[in-house]
Image: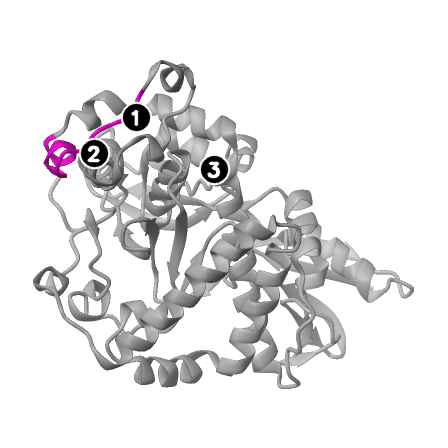
Amino acid sequence: MEFSVKYKERKIPFVLKPETSVLELKKILFSYSNIPHQLQILVSNEQPLSNEMGICDIEFTKDKLVHLTIDSNVDEVLSKFPEGEVTNYQKKMMVDIDLGNNFENRISAIKMMRRIYGYLYRVGQYQEQRLHELIQKTIPIADLVNSEMFLESEKAQIYLDSTEQAKPLLRCDQFNKAGRWGFLLSLMHWFKTKFFKWFGKIECPKCNAPMERQGYTAAFEEDLKYGAPRVEQFCCTSCKHLLRFPRYNSVERLLQSRIGRCGEWANVFAGMTTAFGYDTRLVLDLTDHVWVEVFNESTQKWIHFDPCEDISDKPLTYEVGWGKKLTYIIAFGPLEVVDVTPRYTQALEQVYNRRFEEYQLEENWFSSLLHKINSKLQEKVDPQILELVGKRNKSEQNEFELKITKRDLKKEETRSRISGFEKK
Ligand SMILES: [Zn+2]
């Protein structure tokens, strides 16, 4: 049977033999889409053709398969990584969970799982020692330690003896408590004002006329190497000059390009805080924003850090200041995935209702998914570390319960968004 696959504006003809199994077909589709076969569902006229997981779309004409569209909109995070690596990672992390019988439900559940795996995979890259060294070489540490923000953080000090100095990496526990936090604030301020740039409205490098977004263009080998199969294309409204903007995922590459939107900003900043030994989470807001949380040893609490805005500990900013209608806010650390939504809202009940309207996922299903994934993540972890994670988790859940009844709004949390709206 001859038919064609339509994927990201490419149309690829191929022949399917009658003996081709669903699995073989899915493996062929994987080569076009980077969507692993475990995560595909073949559908025709909205009906799934198989009960396995995954997403793509098949179109029939007169009972003949003529078109097959793979939904590239599902979630792009996973497809940004080298395929073999992602497949292995997903195989390792796949949990046994009921996806329900309703088709819409299954799709929604799979989308959620793919997002979670994608972000966990991304967080995994922060743990590499080589990256920590690269990051520390990029940051002007001496300037940050001498900055007003650091010195203002009451009697900030670094404990450095001769042996400490010999170590290749500066760790946050070499500061006293005040210094530890002061350094973090000073790092974020430097990151926002001196290091990373926002990719927003752009001007033509040749004639300075405004440029217009033209969808996506093909990725080069170099883009793929640094986790960017998605390359945005821009065209000059005057001289028609073309500009490519690869959406890199690799922190290493982003340390050089130093430009992006909130995803890139949070990704690099989370890599940086991890490099100095801060316990860090990457936080995804499903209404389209990404930021970071860092654990504060003094208060024993996870604290919100948004490098795009240069703000910390202002969790109500998005709901109150930006007027967002929040749904899911999920934090990803190396050993856990946590639903941290209660930290960011004053109206949790409404958020739960909205979640169900938009995603049709039962709260029980969602918490059971996170529980299963966390068990996988923590499978071979030192019991002492697990005890600490458990203790922090318990106290965080208590904090969330308190938040439901009592909430103080900070003045700064009423501020509207600045990232993407600043003058150059
Ligand atoms: Zn131009």
Q: Is the CB atom of the residue marked by disc 3 within 8 angstroms of ligand 1's nearest atom?
A: no
Observer-nearest of 339 and 381: 381
Do residues under tags 1 and 2 come within 8 Å of each other at their CB atoms? yes
Label 1 and label 2: CA atoms lie apart by 9 Å
Is the magenta region chiefly helix, strand or loop?
Answer: loop
Label 3 and label 1: CA atoms lie apart by 17 Å
Determine crowd level at label 1: few under 14, some 14-19, many 20+ residues with C-alpha closer than 10 A: some
Element class at badge 1: loop
In reply to whether residue 362 is colored magenta, the answer given is no
Q: Is residue 319 left or right of residue 213?
A: left
Do residues under tags 2 and 3 come within 8 Å of each other at their CB atoms? no
Q: Amino acid at mark 3?
A: Ser
Image: 219 above or below 326: above
In the picture, the disc for residue 139 is 1
For the question of whether residue 281 can be seen, the reply is yes
Q: Which residues are magenta?
A: 148-160
State the residue position of label 3: 250
Determine crowd level at label 3: few under 14, some 14-19, many 20+ residues with C-alpha closer than 10 A: many
Q: Is residue 218 left or right of residue 413?
A: right
Q: Which quadrant does the N terminus fall into?
A: bottom right
- The structure residue drawn at horizontal position 20% and vertical position 38%, both measured from the top left corner, is 182
- Ligand 1 is located in which of the four quadrants? top left
Label 2 and label 3: CA atoms lie apart by 21 Å
Observer-nearest of 109 and 344: 344
Q: Amino acid at mark 2?
A: Trp
